[in-house]
Amino acid sequence: MIEKQHIINRFTSYITIDTESDPKSDSTPSTEKQWNLAKKLAEELKEMGMSDVSIDENAYVMATLPSNVDHEVPAIGFVSHFDTSPDFTGANINPQIVENYDGKDIVLNEVEDIVLSPDYFEDLLQYKGQTLITTDGTTLLGADDKAGITEIMSAIEYLLQHPEIKHGPIKVGFTPDEEIGRGAHKFDVEKFGAKWAYTMDGSQIGELEYENFNAAGADVKVKGKIVHPGYAKGKMVNSMYIAQDFVNSLPRLETPEHTEGRQGFFHLTQISGKVEETNMHYIIRDHDKEHFEARKKMMLDLAEEINSQHQKEVITIEIKDQYFNMREKVEPVMHIVDIAEDAMKAVDVEPIIKPIRGGTDGSQLSFMGLPCPNIFAGGHNFHGRYEYVPVESMIKATEVIVKIAELTAEKYKS
């Protein structure tokens, strides 16, 4: 159905454009270079013959594939983001194509002795005999989420070329800055005009997700007092020791490296300090709303306890909610998950329904009035040098999009 080399060519044309986002920037998009891919996508959509192609002042790209049936079908959407993570460089990506993967180690970079091994990344063994696209060991790959973009573009192109496949109106949306948590912030849901949508932003083949973390960020400031160390007895207050007490008082096993499934965590992502002041940043995550609120309270209570011990305010915490579990917005319209599950089965993909240990644009969009489950895009080991994607997974994701469009039209046929 979908030509393999065409998928490879499209994907590599996207990933070789650097679109790394920047959490320190206040602009949208957060980096000027994201415009390069946004403009390319808008132009390709026009060349395909899509309707209502637009790119707004914040680089959000939208387009419409009109219905080709004579009965009423709700407009559905497909959404992906074009930025890549600032966790690892996305500049000068040099993808490697591994044909007929043999299940053994893949040397990404011989000079630097960087190896992608199934001994460590066991998921590789699922893809023996398939075609893998990897990095050269010096950059990330960008399958998160340029695989999703490739799949949406390829599916739309296929539907345009095969009018015998019946579908209702289909909306396409590409966003900047998802990797820094701002992908949906300026997404115009009303303009998009879909009843519901799907983000193509999951990982391994078969993933179908409608639950994600509730998320918050916490900035912790610890104040100390610096005096000459030779005369410090009873006077010096070392903020770094107080910060250490705070860190050690949180549950040590409730961190990312010790949790899985629906287990939440506290994650210390940054710390910098001197005697007089130490600053820390945490992210707080939990699927359960009550547990999520309890985690925030635990941090605040701990700060209050330490302040009490010092008989003054040495710790202050500012906690900001970031996004919430989309399950509460998707469950009332579970038929949209059922359609995606049926579409996967129809193209011989076994659905893997599980919670996301993270967030997607879909979580925020769901709370903005656009219920938006998440579907696999096929990549593995995101945000680093060991990222890879099987081409066959991208082909299957493309087929799933086409089938969702077809099944939705059938569902609403009178």
Image (spheres, grey):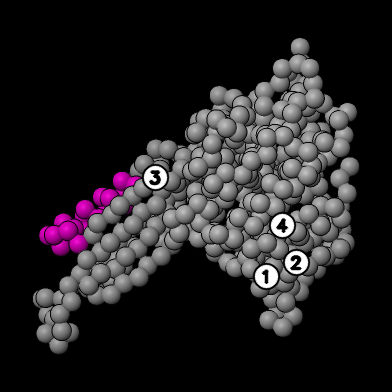
Give the residue number, with chain letter if any, for mark 2. 95
Provide the secondary structure element on which disc 4 rests. helix
The amino acid marked with disc number 2 is: Pro
- Quadrant hosting residue 314: bottom left
Quick check: marks 4 and 3 in contact, CB under 8 Å? no
Distance Cα–Cα, label 2 vs label 4 = 11 Å
**Which label lies toward us, 2 or 3?**
2
Distance Cα–Cα, label 4 vs label 1 = 12 Å
**Residue 245 at x, y percent in the picture:** 29, 65
Give the residue number, with chain letter if any, for mark 3. 321
Residue 200 in the magenta stretch? The answer is no
Q: Is residue 13 above or below residue 201?
A: below
Quick check: marks 2 and 4 in contact, CB under 8 Å? no
Q: Is residue 4 above or below residue 56?
A: below
Q: Is residue 71 visible?
A: yes
Query: Which residue is at 64% across, 68% downward?
Result: 91
Residue 302 in the magenta stretch? The answer is yes
Which numbered dot is residue 14? 4
